[in-house]
Structure formats: structure tokens, C-alpha cells
Image (tube, rainbow, N blue to C red):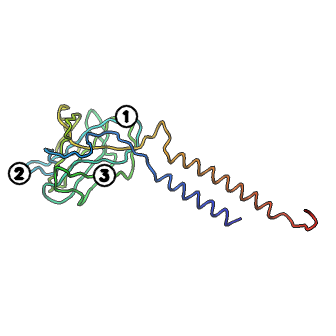
């Protein structure tokens, strides 16, 4: 009995572990299409030729309740150390406010501005609420100049820039915004695959334990040669 029960628990534990690790990501916002090559961009970090330090950001609105999964950005290294700081932020008064998750990238940028892309995966998976505006804001390191390329489809929208995260200013909504793609997992409506697997795993465990106990009771009945 102990071996059968142990096997059942291990099998279900493996199934539940696989279920919770799987995520069904969907696109929340994108101005990138496959095969895009990029041109001009916005300098982030230390601006070239002695300019000031600059953060830049693009706003997007969640069309449902999501957990944040990843962001893909058309960013390339121009000069200095190969580092990049990226922030997922909330909003207040039409400007980025409050860091929901931050990322520090090292040696992940290419030097080709036409095809340079970087994908950043979330660790914390913060919640994005339906109808709320959020921001992806980025800058290079203190002595790094990077370029965040504009999208090549003429997509405009909310964008900000400024020397610090707390002094960002809203730029014109008619600006062609930088290229990025944001993905997340829907948390309302259709259940995630993981939730179906969790339910199935619990039912499987109940059936296996019930059958194992039933067989054990049958097998352990006193043996009487006279009874057939």
C-alpha cells in the first residue's frame, strides 16, 4: 500500500508542478511585426556628444486583467558599458509613477540598431488591471549610451522622457513611439491551462487513493480455505 500511495503522490506532484510553471502569454501591446528593421531612435542613458542623461518611456493600456510576463524592445548599444535599466511602472496624472518591477541587463544589447532586440522576462509577474495605463521606461547606465528605436509603422501614443524617473515629462502624443511588445497572461474569463491541470490532478489523486485503499482492504481479508 505504501508504495502505491507514494507513487500516486509523486505522479500528481509532478503534474501540479508542471501545471503551475506553464503560462499562456498573449500580446497586451505591440507596435512590432516580424521582420522589422529599425532606423532612428531615442538616446537613453548618457546622450552622445555631451548631452544630458535621459530616460525614455512608452505608455500602454491593459485591455483585461493580466499578469505581466515580458517585454521585447528594439534597443541597441551605441557606446559605453553594455548595461540597460528597464522599469515597469504604474501611472499617476498621465505620468509614470511607482515601480512595479525593475530589470538590470548586463551584456544583452547588440550594436546593430537595425535589428537589435532585447527580450526581458518578468520574475514577479505583477498584476496589470483592465483599463489602467502602464509604462515601460528605460535608460542606459551612468556612462552608457543606448538607442531605443522608433517603431517603423508610424504608431503614435503616450511617451515620456526626462533626466530621472521622478522628473519625467509627457511628450506629444503625436510622436512616433519606440518599438516594443508587451505580453501577459489573462487572469479573468477563460481559466488558465494550469488551473484545469490542478483540478485534474486533485481528481486523479482522489481516485488513485480510493482505488488503492479499496484493493488493500480486499487483499487483507483473512484467508479461509473453506470459503470460495
Observer-nearest residue: 72 or 93? 72
Q: 85 left or right of 24? A: left
Residue pointed to by mark 2: 49
Q: 103 left or right of 2? A: left
Q: Secondary structure at mark 3?
A: strand
Observer-nearest residue: 60 or 191? 191
Q: Residue at position x 91%, y 68% from top?
A: 225
Q: Secondary structure at mark 1?
A: loop
Q: Residue at position x 56%, y 58% from top?
A: 13
- Check disc 2: other Cα within 10 Å, few if <14, some if 14-19, many if 20+: few
Q: Are marks 1 and 3 in contact (CB under 8 Å)?
A: no
Which quarter shows the C terminus?
Answer: bottom right
Of pointers 2 and 1, the one earlier in the residue sequence: 2
Tag nearer the camera, 3 or 2: 3
Residue 120: mark = 3
Residue pointed to by mark 1: 63
Tag nearer the camera, 2 or 1: 1
Q: Position of residue 5 (x, y in %)?
A: 67, 62
Q: Position of residue 48 (x, y in %)?
A: 9, 51
Observer-nearest residue: 183 or 99? 183
Q: Secondary structure at mark 2?
A: loop
Amino acid at each position: 500500500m505504501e508504495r502505491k500511495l507514494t507513487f500516486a503522490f509523486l505522479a500528481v506532484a509532478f503534474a501540479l508542478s508542471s501545471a503551475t510553471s506553464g503560462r499562456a502569454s498573449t500580446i497586451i501591446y505591440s507596435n512590432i511585426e516580424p521582420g522589422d528593421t529599425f532606423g532612428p531612435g531615442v538616446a537613453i542613458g548618457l546622450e552622445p556628444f555631451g548631452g544630458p542623461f535621459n530616460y525614455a518611456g512608452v505608455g500602454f493600456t491593459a485591455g483585461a486583467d493580466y499578469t505581466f510576463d515580458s517585454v521585447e524592445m528594439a534597443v541597441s548599444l551605441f557606446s559605453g558599458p553594455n548595461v540597460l535599466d528597464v522599469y515597469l511602472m504604474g501611472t499617476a496624472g498621465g505620468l509614470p509613477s511607482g515601480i512595479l518591477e525593475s530589470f538590470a541587463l548586463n551584456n544583452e544589447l547588440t550594436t546593430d540598431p537595425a535589428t537589435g532586440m532585447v527580450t526581458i522576462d518578468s520574475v514577479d509577474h505583477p498584476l496589470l488591471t483592465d483599463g489602467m495605463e502602464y509604462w515601460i521606461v528605460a535608460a542606459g547606465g551612468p556612462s552608457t549610451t543606448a538607442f531605443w528605436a522608433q517603431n517603423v509603422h508610424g504608431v503614435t501614443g503616450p511617451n515620456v522622457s526626462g533626466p530621472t524617473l521622478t522628473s519625467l515629462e509627457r511628450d506629444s502624443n503625436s510622436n512616433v513611439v519606440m518599438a516594443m511588445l508587451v505580453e501577459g497572461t489573462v487572469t479573468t474569463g477563460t481559466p488558465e491551462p494550469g488551473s484545469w491541470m490542478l483540478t485534474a490532478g486533485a481528481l486523479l489523486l482522489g481516485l488513485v487513493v480510493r482505488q488503492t485503499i479499496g484493493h488493500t482492504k480486499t487483499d487483507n481479508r483473512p484467508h479461509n480455505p473453506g470459503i470460495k
